[in-house]
Amino acid sequence: MRKKIHVLAAVVLAAAVGAAVARADDPVVTAKADLQKLVTDATTLHSTVLADAQKISADVQSLQGSTDRQTVKQSLQADVQKVQSDRGQLLPAVQADWTQLKADLQAVRQSKSGKGQLEPLVQQANQQLTQERDAVQTALQAAHQAAQALRQSLKGSGQGSHTKTTTP
């Protein structure tokens, strides 16, 4: 039984090494893999920031009618810090993926292989990522508007800040 496990492990390892060698030799395969990694990492970024933006909106909704300005401020500051933290953590991987993909696409062009294989994949990925980015942008704008409305309601209740504003 142990011998079968070792043989199976050796076969799996050999296949993985063979695939890695084949991948290194074929710029199209490398570019496809890096494109998929970019899409995966960018989708993770978008999904995470979208969830954070939706949490801000939900928190603003739950804080409507509150008169405790300090609680509102602390809650929303924590939410904003979470968005910034998540974005700061996840964005560098997406940027590195993008840099790697550009280099891989250049290698594909230089090798003159796989002509036309990558263009539809890149277009499809671009469409998907554009939709995700638009959804995040919309959610962040909605959260911002909701927070502004909450801020105005606090000012109306006499609990807002008392800073002077001047009109131009």
Image (tube, rainbow, N blue to C red):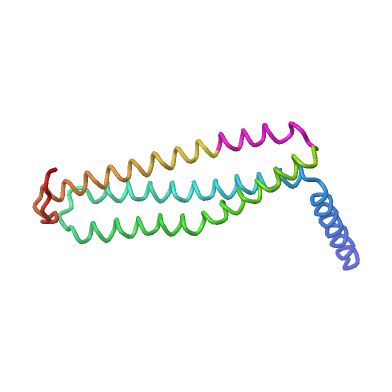
Q: Position of residue 103 (x, y in %)?
A: 68, 48
**Residue at the (57%, 55%) spot, across then down:** 93
Q: Position of residue 24 (x, y in %)?
A: 80, 52
In this rendering, is residue 168 above or below 79? above
Residue located farthest toward the left when viewing the structure as drawn: 158
Quadrant of the frame with the N terminus:
bottom right
Magenta span: chief secondary structure = helix
Q: Position of residue 160 (x, y in %)?
A: 14, 54
**Residue at the (8%, 52%) spot, across then down:** 158
- Closer-to-camera residue (122/68): 122
**Residue at the (56%, 52%) spot, across then down:** 95
Q: Is residue 31 left or right of residue 88?
A: right
Quadrant of the frame with the C terminus:
top left
- Closer-to-camera residue (146/162): 162
In this rendering, is residue 101 above or below 138? below
- Closer-to-camera residue (98/59): 98
Q: Is residue 125 magenta?
A: yes
Residue located farthest toward the bottom when viewing the structure as drawn: 2
| Range shown magenta | 114-128
- Closer-to-camera residue (54/2): 54
Q: Is residue 128 left or right of residue 80?
A: right
Q: Is residue 33 left or right of residue 7?
A: left
